[in-house]
Amino acid sequence: MFQTNSRYIDIGDSSIQTKDGKTIVYKKRRFLPNSLNTTLVQEIQVTKGDRLDQIATRIIGDPEQFWRICDSNNIMHPLELTRDSGSTIKITRLWS
């Protein structure tokens, strides 16, 4: 169902039974990892026009891994990271 580089690949399934007997299977809730227990690798200052997918490509080598940078910064909404020029994005070692 999910690709191996998905943030949901290691999240377990759960299910619920409806009144009419159907079983609905869903993914359990994903919580942000605690980035306080990680190693800071570098910090990037946001400039006008920066996009998180491009930063992820440059740092991780995969634009679809932008979510790892969000996790490093305890951010739920990716656009928050590049909204303000001059802000700092932390890059931590959250991935192996």
Image (tube, rainbow, N blue to C red):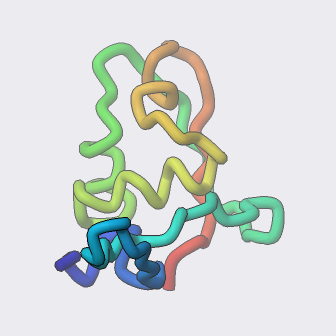
Q: Residue sitting at 54 percent across and 30 percent down? A: 45
Q: Residue sitting at 36 percent across and 80 percent down? A: 9
1 over 26 or under it: above or below: below
* Residue 19 x, y percent position in the rendering: 36, 66
Q: Nearer the viewer, residue 71 or 52?
A: 71
Seen from this angle, which residue lies furthest front?
20
Q: Nearer the viewer, residue 38 or 20?
A: 20
Question: Splitting the image into 4 quarters, where does residue 58 fall?
Answer: bottom left
* Residue 66 x, y percent position in the rendering: 36, 52
Q: Residue sitting at 34 percent across and 45 percent down? A: 55
Left or right: 83 in relation to 93? left
* Residue 54 x, y percent position in the rendering: 25, 43
Q: Residue sitting at 58 percent across and 39 percent down? A: 89
96 over 26 or under it: above or below: below
9 over 67 or under it: above or below: below
Q: Nearer the viewer, residue 26 or 92?
A: 26
Left or right: 13 in relation to 20? right
For the N terminus, give its image quadrant. bottom left
* Residue 61 x, y percent position in the rendering: 26, 66
Seen from this angle, which residue lies furthest right?
36
13 over 75 or under it: above or below: below
Q: How many marks?
A: 0
Q: Nearer the viewer, residue 38 or 26?
A: 26
